[in-house]
Image (tube, rainbow, N blue to C red):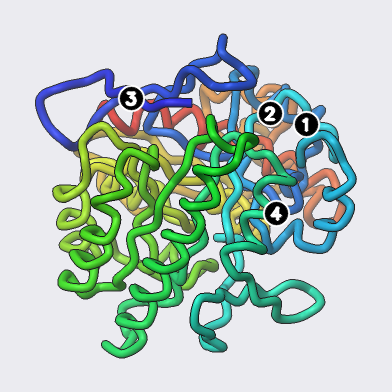
Amino acid sequence: MKFDIVTSGGRAPRLGVLRAIERRPDVEIETPLALLHTQGGHIPHVAHELLKLVSDEPQILQISLVSVHCFRETLEHFRGRVPDLPGGRDSLTCLTLHDPSNLTKQGHHVSDKVPIWTKYGKVLYNAEMYMNIVENFKPDMYYLLSDGDTNKTSPEKRVSKAVENTINLTRQCLERHRKSEILKNKFVMAPIAGGYCLRSREKSIAALSKEISSVSGFLIDGLHNNGPEVEFLPVEELKEVVEYVVRRLPEDKLVSVQGCWNPLSVIKLVRLGVDMFDTSYCRILTERSSALTFNIEESDDEENYEINLRDVKFSEDFNPIFDGCLCLSCTKYSKAYIHHLLTMQELLAPVLIMIHNIHHYLRKARLFGAI
């Protein structure tokens, strides 16, 4: 898999395309791109069979290590890939470390190891353990192991330790990647650590300068600790960091961020030069019974981009969630019906809301780079 820039004349915003995919050489995926957030390989509330009703275009599933750690031993004896187990054989995959929709616990740091928090408790991963998992999972793209436990309030000592840890882990992972026949054609994303300290970011970038030929893209890591709070994180607070990092990276490499960014934040991040994000925001939105209703207008800075279908005012509203939306939920059902399902606590309610949210998000994501 490789990343090619389609537009020219400036670093941001830009349009690109992922092509020459090892398993699907006939497929090309345009950027800006939203990875489909999953938990254990499943999109929350939406079965893989229903995904075809959401989008008939090729999609990349974002699968976090923390959500599939429990069946790592099974995969050691499984000859297929992770999505083959739940049934998503046609899907492309991206392996990440943490679930961006869940708050990542802070602390518990160990040199050259990174903690992940599974339902069985804390598990420490070093580079060898992580790369063993990657080889067993056989993802189409993956992020290298990193220490991203920093945020706006992290002290200088924690930021410094995160950078040192990430540099060491990245070097060890890349050594293993270069020796692996299974991973030689995979799309590798290297992390840039350093929190909100520009000097630390520069150190992280400098350490990767000798490894540029081995990586296909970069993750701007350590901006937050994941979870629903990211929705309310002002892009203005991290603009200086993102701009600083993007300016110092090779233009022909893909740039990624993770997190539950709201639509307005995603648009601002794309303008700063980010090429890839994820749909974890759709999950937290669905969990609170809310549906996306945002339009994309260059002059539209409104922060009102959702409606809560539990609101009693929708009990007699027989219009679709969003006028003009062609998703299954909007073409077949009304706000009043979904409100009724929520009131009766029917399982179909979050299914219909999630179908709409993903469809709407993916449809608008195509336009993010054109703003």
| Tag in front: 4 or 1 | 4
Write the residue at 62% across / 54% down. Answer: 131
Residue 355, position in %: x, y?
Answer: 68, 36
Residue 292, position in %: x, y?
Answer: 52, 43
User: Is 173 on the left-hand or right-hand side of 250?
Assistant: right
Q: Quarter of the image holding residue 128? A: bottom right
Q: Amino acid at mark 4?
A: Ile
Q: Which mark is residue 236?
A: none
Q: Secondary structure at mark 4?
A: helix
* Residue 357 in sight from this viewpoint: no
Q: Which residue is mark 4?
A: 133
Q: CA distance from mark 4 to mark 2?
A: 19 Å
Q: Which residue is mark 1?
A: 88
Contact flag, marks 1 and 2 (Cβ < 8 Å): yes
Write the residue at 63% across / 30% down. Answer: 92
Contact flag, marks 1 and 3 (Cβ < 8 Å): no
Mark toward the start of the polypeptide (4 vs 2): 2
**Residue situated in front as seen by the camera: 349 or 168:** 168
Q: Secondary structure at mark 1?
A: loop
| Tag in front: 4 or 2 | 4
Residue 133, position in %: x, y?
Answer: 70, 54
* Residue 239 in sight from this viewpoint: yes
Q: Which residue is mark 2?
A: 91
Mark toward the start of the polypeptide (1 vs 3): 3
Q: Which residue is mark 3?
A: 16
